[in-house]
Image: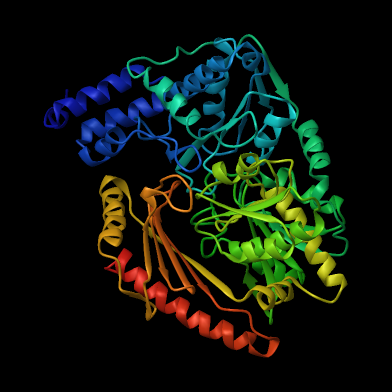
Amino acid sequence: MSGVAANLDPDLVGAVRAWIALDPDPVTRAELEGLLEQGDTATLHERFDRPLTFGTAGLRGIVGGGPGAMNRLVVRRTAAGVVDWVRRKGTDAVARGIVVGRDARHGSAAFARDTIEVASAAGVRVLELDRPLPTPLTAFAVRHFGASAGVVVTASHNPARDNGYKVYDEDGSQVIAPADHEIEAAAARLDDAAPAPAPVHGDVELVAASELIAAYEAAIGDVDGDARGLRVVYTPLHGVGGAVVPSLLEGHGAEVTVVPEQAMPDPDFPTVAFPNPEEPGALDLAIALATRAHADLVVANDPDADRLCVAVPDAGSWRTLSGDELGAILGEERCRRTTGADRLVATTIVSSSMLAGIAASHGVDFATTLTGFKWLGRAGARRHERLVFAYEEALGYAVSEAVADKDGISAALLVCVVAAARAEAGSSLLEALDELELAHGVHLTRQLSFRREGARGHAEIEAVVERLVADPPGTLGGLEVTLVEDLSKGVDGLGPTEGVRLRAGDRVRVVVRPSGTEPKLKAYVEVVAAPVGPDELATSRAESASVLAAVCGDVTKRCDPEA
């Protein structure tokens, strides 16, 4: 042991050495050896004090050594947990097998291969997608093939340094309790061991991407429509959406130009600081190209194409629609074009409340869930209804009954169909928003994010939430706070979750919670105004915007005092 390592906590050193002895990857072994040599106590504690667990969307973390990062040992243990869970379902589940997909991030190919090796060595059938594909196709494939589970290796919109591991149940929805706990418990039983690397054998079948894409496109016929004449600029943000989305839109008549600098998968995401279409600057190249090309619409996916972002022309410039604005437009369309007394639409406790009014106006049932599509995707099944639309404000939409998860592909098609129909009628998506606000009132929303890295940041996030519960503000934006709800106690008949919800009368709602996918504290603010006539709409928006700005200022002071 080096002199530096000798000065470290012996228990920590022992844990690191034990992990290195089991780690099958020479790269992450060397990284941990280097951290020991450098005496990097802070990083080692981050990697070993808080092992990755299933969050809002499965496992997600930095690629590196240790139980608190994404690496081959974590993946092999998690895969063994998935295998144990599938085998406990019975021999039929083993025979139906698991679908394994991946995106094009650093480590994704190796993590998918480890999953396939562990499952096949245990005698579980594997359906392997033959190349990197969008996450919604894995979710679709689980139900399409009648598999008992699915795994997709992806970190979605996270920074380039991250990767993740998402698990689906046989219904094509992301796993929830008790399944996620059973998988974690089975993986934890391997704390002193690791599934031995084994050559792939047994029942492993390659699924041709072309055949899966064709089946998917046929299955999303419930969002078909004509997009002829619509000029679209599209970016996959260096992700895998380019393999599917342009040809899909072109097949429905749209004229699609792909941003060349971002067209091909690149795990380094060289043209964006964060590969998240919500982030400032992420759409700059697309909007610049759309301006030069006189396009009608900018369409963007995140790198695994489960999220969708749209920008539209607005008075000589471009306006990016918020997740809630696009959710209202797509929700109205799905309510309008579907039929049946068993229809349900759903959104989350942090999204705009406008969808409830839209649903009521069409005689469609409405439900609210906790944050994340692992809850939204099951909303219909829990109520024995058809989930015809679901969305969350973070750019996630389920617009087809073919996929029980957020799907930026079918959502891209539907928004193009709606935009084309509007253009044909001499209207626009912005006018669609006007109509919705006239009918249901102005609903302005904004998300605030406060990044906090590492173990210290995690503690700071927890402390902010605890303070808001114990000592909430008396006013928000000059309006008296009338209700404080500790989400860990459960609200609205929903299960407990981390966070707090504040209300100021019937106009202001604020939810503050830790992100389930990134080291961030997030605040979701909504300001609502009663419906007014066309002549008063601009005034109502301006007044609501003023209140929104004041509320956001108050929230920022409580969540980030140094800002």
Query: In the image, is 304 to the left or to the right of 163?
Result: right
Q: Quadrant of the N terminus?
A: top left
279 and 225: which is toward the camera: 225
Residue at x 28%, y 28% (from the top left corner): 33
Vertically, is 145 above or below 345?
Answer: above
Examine the rendering and report whether any part of residue 25 can be seen: no
Residue at x 44%, y 36% (from the top left corner): 54
- Percent position (x, y) of residue 184? 42, 27
472 and 87: which is toward the camera: 472
**Colour setting:** rainbow
Query: In the image, is 422 to the left or to the right of 434?
Result: right
Query: In the image, is 59 to the left or to the right of 385?
Result: left
Q: How many marks?
A: 0
Query: In the image, is 61 to the left or to the right of 129?
Result: left
In the picture as drawn, the residue positioned furthest to the bottom comes out as 535
- Percent position (x, y) of residue 38? 22, 36
Q: Quadrant of the C terminus?
A: bottom left
Examine the rendering and report whether any part of residue 102 can be seen: yes
- Percent position (x, y) of residue 388? 72, 49
Residue at x 84%, y 77% (from the top left corner): 426
243 and 140: which is toward the camera: 140
Vertically, is 219 above or below 394?
Answer: above
| Residue 125, quarter of picture | top right
- Percent position (x, y) of residue 537? 64, 85
Vertically, is 456 above or below 550?
Answer: above
Residue at x 31%, y 22% (from the top left corner): 19
